[in-house]
Amino acid sequence: MVRKIALMLCIVALEAASGLGTSLADNGPIPPGEAAAKAALERSPRHHEWVDIAVHGRESRVAAFIAFPERKEKAPVVVVIQEVYGLTDWIRAVADRLAADGFIAIAPDLLSGKGHGGGGTDTFRNRDDVVKAVRGLPAPDVVAMLDAVTLYGKGLPAATERFATVGFCWGGGQSFHYAAVRPDLAAAVVYYGTSPSLDALGAIRAPVLGLYGEDDARVNATVGPAAERMKELGKTFIVHTYPGAGHGFLRAQDGRGGANLEASRKAWPATIGHLKKHLE
């Protein structure tokens, strides 16, 4: 019996050291990296479903992936805004992790209707074509789709009225921008996304959390001026910049000699804390 217990403790220690211990059970305390996203989704005990949501002013609908939490009470809604790579398994795994943390998470495919045969992200020939299409999305169209998704989410029987956005890369910039056009947004989280123009910041009411890698000069050049202006306006913009981490650190957790993983382990609890503070 003593040897058996010792062996079990040894296995737990090895799993903890490799970062696998909790992730095998429930994705771990943070979302999985890109390589582990599909397997994490397949293991998830939470309810997932796909819906097609009508968008005002356009014929085609926007497809969205929804992950539901396992809880007794109604849950606030978090809209997960994709990277420039479209709606991927990784974005869906992030939504699932948000559900594990108690939120109804909705991840829309903002390329719905733009792909082959009127499809979405998964109908494009390659990632380069996806990137080009995402970068070509007009800002008013993105807002219209996010509005439709938000309305749908808040209308779910298990949802509360409060909602937030979390975005990554291109979607991080969209999360920040959406805060400037939706005065009823309860909170916004920006992962390594560029900031809006300084003129747009005056309309923001939601508290914004910005999470950035130190080695991401293109994005970070927009953060300082935005933070200074938000402070002048008396608005909340909390900034965390993680040493040695690069752009896309939450997805690329195995990159930059451990700095991306360290950043992820700090950024995700900050994300959940921000959301819980302002949504519940």
Image (cartoon, helix red, strand yellow):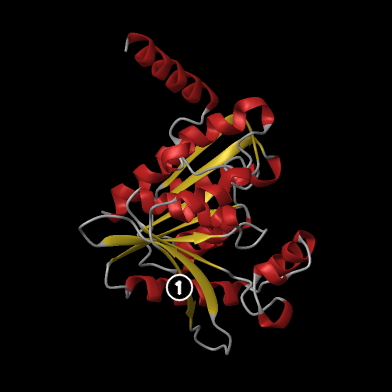
User: Where residue 42 sits in the image (x, y, percent)?
Assistant: 50, 53
Percent of width and height locating residue 215: 67, 34
Q: Is residue 185 left or right of residue 72?
A: right
Name the amino acid type tagged 1. Answer: Val
Instruction: Give the residue number, with chain letter if any, for mark 1.
Output: 149
Q: Give 167 or 139, whichever is nearer the viewer.
A: 167
Q: Secondary structure at mark 1?
A: helix
Residue 241, horizontal then vertical, whole percent:
55, 35
Residue 66 vertical position relative to residue 193 in the rendered view, above or below: below
Instruction: Work out whether residue 192 or residue 118 is closer to the camera in this orientation and state it.
Output: 118
Q: Is residue 123 above or below residue 37?
A: below
Count all numbered tags in the image, as a single digit.
1
Label 1 crowd bin: few (<14), some (14–19), many (20+), radius 10 Å:
many
| Residue 128 position by quadrant | bottom right
Question: Is 155 placed left or right of 112 in the picture?
Answer: left
The quarter in which the N terminus is drawn is: top left
| Residue ranking furthest to the top | 2
Q: Residue at x 68, y 66 (%)?
A: 134
Residue at 27%, 73% (x, y): give it.
Answer: 157
How far across and how far down the image is residue 269, in percent?
Answer: 40, 38
Q: Is residue 260 visible?
A: yes
